[in-house]
Amino acid sequence: MKQIVVISGKGGTGKTVMSACFAVLARNAVLADVDVDASNLHLLLRPEIQERHIFRSGLKARIDAKKCTGCGLCLPHCRFNALYEDKEGKAVVEALSCEGCGLCYHICPEKVIEMETQIAGEWYISKTKYGPFVHARLGIAEENSGKLVTEVRKKARELAATEARDLVIMDGAPGIGCPVIASLTGTDLALIVTEPTPSGRHDMERIVGLARYFKIRVACCINKFDLNLENSEQIEKWCREQSIPVTGKIAFDAAVPESVVRGVPYVEYTSNSSVDEIRRMWSSLLELIT
Amino acid sequence: MIISIASGKGGTGKTTIAVNLALALQPNHAVQFLDCDVEEPNAHFFLKPRIEESREVFTPIPEIDENLCNYCRKCAEVCAYNALAVVKGAVLVFSELCHGCGACSLLCPEKAIREVGNRIGVIESGRAGDIRFIHGWLDIGQAMSPPLIRALKKEMDPSLNVIIDVPPGTSCPVIESLKRSEFCLLVTEPTPFGRHDLELAAGAAKEMKIPCGVVINRASLGNGDGEVRDFCAREGIPVLMTIPFDRKIAEAYSRGQTIVEAFPVYRSAFLSLFENIKKLLS
């Protein structure tokens, strides 16, 4: 079984639109949305949720205000500024800042601090007309997005194994931090969707660096390449120097946002030269991983 | 005043709005610009600051003194992040999992753990015209950006008009960036993706009790901005600015040009955006 992840560094370059196109073009894949922080792929794949699971992860301190003697011992030790003193001199937890390390719990002489497991989100197994789909929703302001990504990926691989599907296609998150690292490790190919802007180009260089750090093979897609032909040429040149295959150059098309508004993968929404280019790109990606 | 620019979804125009607001304010207001997207900082492409200072940022990670350690396993027991493991005759430290909480060193009965610095990135500061500019770079391969964002925000000077460019998403890096903000501008676009993520971002601001307002970027995309406006009306969030979709703006952006540079008529729109935020807060 092979795994492809679609990432970009910069947000809004077209990861989800491409992922949905691949979901249509792949014949025997499991689909996964590993952008658990702001997931969008479900808006194009229109899943029918079949299983819903609670994601429990991370701890937060809770102080029993009745029993706290206000000794203040815990206050200076919290490195996350999550403890403060209330009007009566008792310690209070600021839940949004608490990272659940448990230091206060361990040093409280009165044993009035408890560490509680958090419900950090939900994950789902769904049916779509393109194949099974694993997705998730991280609770607002929650941590542990990396762990939820790992959970979604594990489920997607298990589904691929039980249903004899040979490919997992993952729609990734922006950035280069913990959820992206969790989505990248152990994949067979990372497709980097970029755009011909200074930010797109620069963020691609950082994400290529990250993929190389984890020894993951990369390919590049220049989306909206005709917005700035000169920048697109520079990206192609840079990719050549880095031996990164440019597998697709997709022209700007107002039908892309229209397809998103209709909730339909772009390759199903219309037929034109950009759609043909995406089909060609998909074939090249398959060649790269076989 | 501290104003954060956030969005949930990436690529809706956070940096564009933040940079143009800063440039519009610059002639008559003292502005400090913080680019808190330390994973993919981009504001410098448009503000073109002259960097005057650069410093490395470290987080504390444990180092074991093998002469004092008796392998009692206390450190591994208290570590909430599984960053320490005790195997036969050795303590293993997994620095990428460590949050730097200090529990292991404080609670080691043998006092065999001291903390050493683990580099996670750099912070650079300088000036873009009269704008005081600060951004950070997370080192490639580092998973956790919040400690770097915390270090960056220590440089914040609330006596100035602070504009914070927030990373995409709604999880810990976003929360860290939003802390202490007096107002949060949410930038969205009228597509199902933009709207869906706007709801998440508005939820995060609400959770943090930060008043917010919306900027609708590329307002003429898709079916137009009707549904975004309905959502804002339901939630009582004011729509403070709309920018129509214009391929010329996208092309200017691709050349590293700002809106107020390429289309000076927008300067007054960004100024009234600022005045409206001030009115909302007074």
Image: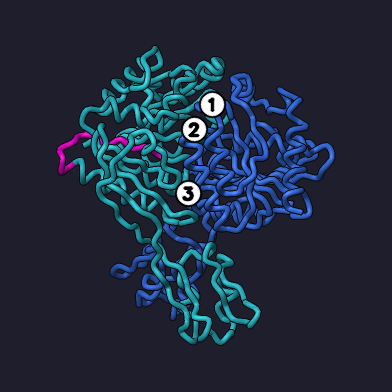
Chain colours: A cyan, B blue
B168 horizontally vs A153: left or right? right
Where does label 2 land, which residue? B191
Q: Nearer the viewer, residue A47 or A101?
A: A47
User: Which amino acid, mark 2?
Assistant: Thr
Residue furthest out toward the right: B28
**Label 2 lies in what chain?**
B
Q: CA distance from mark 3 to mark 1?
A: 37 Å
Q: Which mark is residue B142?
A: 3
Q: What residue did someone put label 1 on? A: B221
Residue A171: in magenta span: yes
Tell me which corner region of the image, top left, top right, bottom left or bottom right, holds residue B42: top right
- Please report contact status of discs 1 and 2: CB closer than 8 Å, yes or no: yes
Question: Residue at position x 39%, y 36% from top?
Answer: A43
Q: Residue at x 55, y 68 (%)?
A: A94
Let me know if residue A237 appears in the view. no
Say which label, 1 or 2, has the lower sequence index: 2
Report, in whole angstroms, how far the alpha carbon at label 1 lies from the one at label 2.
7 Å
Q: Earlier in the sequence, mark 3 or mark 1?
A: 3
In front of the other: A76 or B225: B225
Looking at the rendered structure, whether the residues under marks 3 and 1 are on a common chain is answered as: yes
- Disc 1 marks a residue whose amino acid type is Leu
Please tell me the numbered disc located at residue A285.
none
Task: Give the image location of residue A110, x and y in percent.
Answer: 49, 87
- Distance, label 2 to label 3, CA atoms, is 33 Å
Q: Quadrant of the C terminus of chain B?
A: bottom right
Q: Earlier in the sequence, mark 2 or mark 3?
A: 3
Task: Determine the residue positioned at 33% across, 51% down.
Answer: A123
- Range covered by the magenta-colored residues: A161-172
